[in-house]
Image (spheres, rainbow, N blue to C red):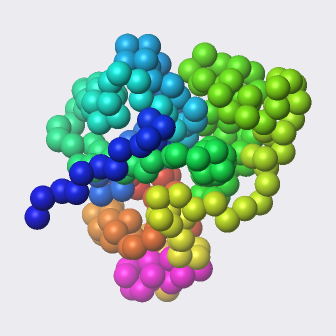
Amino acid sequence: MPRLARVKSNTGIYHIMVRGVNKQDIFKDDEDRERFLDTLLRFKKETMFNLYAYCLMNNHLHLLLKEDEVNISDIIKKISTSYVYYFNSKYERVGHLFQDRYKSEVVEDDKYFYSVIRYIHQNPIKARIANIEDFKWSSYKSYIYNEELIDTDFFLNMLATNREKAIVRYIDYMMEINNDRCMEIDEFSRLSDEKVKRHIIQLGNLKNIADIHKLEKIERNNLLRKAKALEKVSILQVSRITGINRRAIAKV
């Protein structure tokens, strides 16, 4: 069946989500995240797109950007090709890193633009990783400190003509509890820790979760692979429940 053509935004603004193939981690350490942001800045200058928000999670990322002369597909292709080359070289791997097709949605009105920025910046909260102000790998603080990568004026001017007042309103808006949903994707409808713990105990025929540390390495890794494959279960969650380093889990 042929793929449906992407919807063209009348404003040129798109919310983009790129996910690791099979939900695997696309960032293994801070060096990887720094490299991706450097790549983003390089192609931003080359293709002249505007960037309004980003968030780098372990196995996926979000971007809110506006295309200029270079279309969105070519922009994402340039960024992803460059980063995958770096990633595969560093980790001595071959093959795809990202899912075959990135997800995108058009952003064509101010209200939804507001919602998407907040949704992107609140990703770490909804994934129960960190508070919005403590998470290093999003553009949240760029609006406060006016960092180079993000085109902050566009959104801040929507909030107020005075920059200081706009930043105060921005912080208040980012902190609001909300039910923002974007792309009709429920990324964070995870199973509870207790349910995941029961699944792991059952899969490994364990008496309790602590027994996973008594297993032989091959047996333990087989169990971790099964745990990772459970629907709506993240590597971070398996790590938290088992006490096994998430990087070790990602490698099995």
Query: Could you say where residue 184 lies in the image, as x and y percent from the top left?
Result: 47, 65
Please identify the dominant SS of the magenta region: helix
Which range is magenta? 194-206
Observer-nearest residue: 239 or 109?
Answer: 109
Q: Residue furthest left?
A: 1
Query: Could you say where residue 210 lies in the image, as x and y percent from the top left?
Result: 54, 73
Residue 200 colored in magenta in the image: yes
Q: Residue at x 30, y 57 (%)?
A: 22
The answer to whether one can see residue 52 in this image is yes
Query: Could you say where residue 77 lies in the image, as x and y percent from the top left?
Result: 27, 32
Q: Residue at x 84, y 39 (%)?
A: 169
In this rendering, the answer to whether 146 lies above or below 6 is above
Q: Quadrant of the N terminus?
A: bottom left
Q: Is residue 140 left or right of residue 92?
A: right
Q: Quadrant of the C terminus?
A: bottom left
Residue 204 colored in magenta in the image: yes
Total numbered badges shown on the rendered structure: 0
Q: Residue at x 42, y 86 (%)?
A: 202
Q: Residue at x 68, y 24 (%)?
A: 153
Query: Could you say where residue 36 lies in the image, as x and y percent from the top left?
Result: 43, 28
Q: Is residue 24 left or right of residue 247?
A: left
